[in-house]
Amino acid sequence: MTLDAISLGSFALGAVTLGGPWGWLGWAVLACVPVLIFLLYFLKLRRSRLEVPSTFLWKRSIEDLQVNSLWQRLRSTLLLWLQLAIAILLLLSMLPIGCQSDQRVGQRHIFLLDTSASMAAREGESTRFELAKQQIDAQLSQLREIDLAMLMTSDDQAQIRQAYTSDSALLRRKLQDVTVRPRLTKFDDALIAATALANPSHVRDAGDQLTSEQVANELQKNRATLHMYSDGGFPPIKDTDLGELVVNFVPTGGANSNNLAITTFNAQWNEKNRGSIDLFARIENFSEAPVPIDVELRRNGEIIDVVRREAVEPRAALSLDFQDTLPAQQDSVTEYQLKIVGSDDLLLDDTAHSVVNPGRRPQVMLVTSGNPGLEAVLSTTLIAEGLELLVQSPEFLETDAYQAMVDQPLFDLVVFDRVSPKKLPMANTMSWGAAPSSDWQLTPLTPPVFVLFGNNTHPLTLNLNLDTLAFLKASGVKGPPATVDLLTANDGVLIAVGPRVGFQDLVLGFTLTDEENGVRFPVTDWPGRISFPVFMFKTLEYLGRLGQKEIASSVRPGQVLRFRLESEETELKVVSPGGKEARVNKLTDGGFVFSGTDELGIYRVIGKDEKHVRSFAVSLSDRRESDLAVKSQTMVGDSAVTATTESKIQGDSKSWRYLLLLALGVLCLEWIVYNRRILM
């Protein structure tokens, strides 16, 4: 129900909106209350037959009869007007009247709740997270109906749980649905979103259409207060202009905490003894007092070692080294669990996992008619121990074996020396002195060719000094769109890398040697410089996956995992620690992507015939989350935001409504007692 605009002196009210939980029928019933009170005074008395000794009493009875006659003039009594006034005030108190105008606007509040792992820390009989929810719920219950509020949550990802609304009941329901997640804390995205809401770009950029006063008024309307409920376990928020946003940091948690945490746990093959596993762990005491510790190490669920220490000093760390000799089953997955026995304030960091999967060396093929320089650098001890190299002649490109490489990813890197294939394989490629496909063009340059500068930001040429190289013979390289130039000469580009669906192609417009009249001679002295083996090593790392694993043994919660397996399977099943199954399909580059890493523990990758082929672990292992000390202030942009013990908003008190109801009850009771003679 909306009333037209009215004017009170110099203060103009816009539309006055009457809302509330009742419909028209409910309001009609309430509106009848004053009428019923009024009608009670017209009730006729029901007279009893009495014998009276005096005519004076007859006069009194006549007066009562006149008063209670329905058609007689109503006698004005103080009790009647008090009852009517109380009833009208009671009705007005139940009307949620909101005024919409340019002169008066409600407040805007953004409630940001930390849902990261540290908020699961125990605080008495509850947790920090539950205490923060209770505080926010209490604030939401005090919202006025002209105010707007928004609910946001953030761990390493920011989420808007409920956009701006004046419905406090809806906000409170959304709040109850929020749960804590074993994630790290990062508030940057949440602050960016809140700042954008409080400083809308369409207002700040409207300088040509609006006056400075109009811009200030618009910004005033959008001004908001951000209430951050967190224990402060997040890094400083930099490069943020708060503008019209007011930040209120409400710390959650007690002053003292008791927490032992596993901050590091790794397992890997022993380089000298392939039958042994080296394990390393770091446990830190984030308490303010010495704490004894008992640790269990399990392999595939069975305890293989126990460590006990009488005490770990406050704010100190304990390093543990283990070595495990595996049975003769190196082709199987080995899963390790390290657990702190006992209880402290945060259980999520008391257990860590690591996995050792069957090893695999990168597969590299060299297609050449003979190049001692390339074969030498690929056969060095350092690289030979890390990859499997297969050398083939150019005739190999016409065989069915090469056609199989075109159809499926069998190699990580194929090096073409002065030869171009008819069709590129499903692998990264490196081409010397020849265009790998029709997408590339090589144009001869006028000799001698001198290098002008190199790309010092790309991983292939990072920190390499290539500016003094010279070539007797070279060609300029031009690739497809999105090609990155790595080495530029006086007349063109000598080295470039470009994308291909799922792969990358590295093209060099020169060779290391050339042949004339049956005599082979060097084209450049680059192989004799230290930068050449370094460049080749970087290439094998970047394109040949040298030193990389098929699948990471451990990732952080929420991290997207990309992996590849040397198998013909196009679909795999990933089983979470809680038993939840997810299907992942092979991508065009032969890899897989899995993003459901929200649980802590070991995930198993299941292949064909339900075979357990690989595993990976998800552990918290973060010092910032494990350090439960509540921060007294935090940096937001260039401002230091000091913690406040309580966040208060201007609420709408409703206690006076109950007082009015009580007053009406008392007056009604008085009326009944006073007029007990006229009760039916």
Image (cartoon, rainbow, N blue to C red):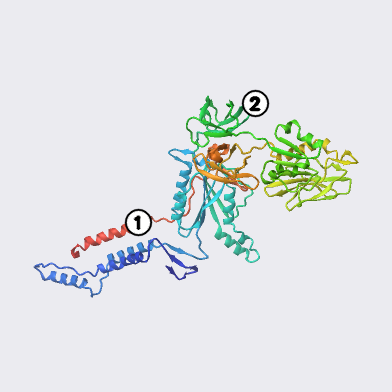
* Quadrant of res 570: top right
Q: Residue 15's spot in the image, x, y percent?
A: 47, 68
Q: Which residue type does callout 1 highlight? A: Tyr
Residue 386 numbered tag: none
Q: Residues within 10 Å of mark 1 (few under 14, many from 20)?
A: few
Q: Which residue is mark 1?
A: 658
Q: Is residue 523 left or right of residue 168?
A: right
Q: Which residue type does callout 2 highlight? A: Asn
The relative height of residue 30 versus residue 451 in the rendered view (above or below) is: below
Q: Residue 603's spot in the image, x, y percent?
A: 54, 39
Q: Which quadrant does the N terminus fall into?
A: bottom left
Q: CA distance from mark 1 to mark 2?
A: 81 Å
Q: Is residue 98 left or right of residue 607?
A: left
Q: Residue 86's spot in the image, x, y percent?
A: 33, 63
Mark 2 lies on a secondary structure that is loop
The relative height of residue 132 versus residue 169 in the rendered view (above or below) is: above
Residue at the far bottom: name it: 71
Of residues 39 and 267, the one nearer the viewer is 267
Q: Earlier in the sequence, mark 1 or mark 2?
A: 2
Q: Residue 647's spot in the image, x, y percent?
A: 49, 49
Q: Which residue is mark 2?
A: 273
Residue at position x 35%, y 64% from top? 26
Q: Is residue 544 left or right of residue 357?
A: right
**Could you tell me if residue 29 is visible in this image?**
yes
Mark 1 lies on a secondary structure that is helix
Of residues 426 and 112, the one nearer the viewer is 426
**Could you tell me if residue 461 is visible in this image?**
no
Of residues 400 and 291, the one nearer the viewer is 400
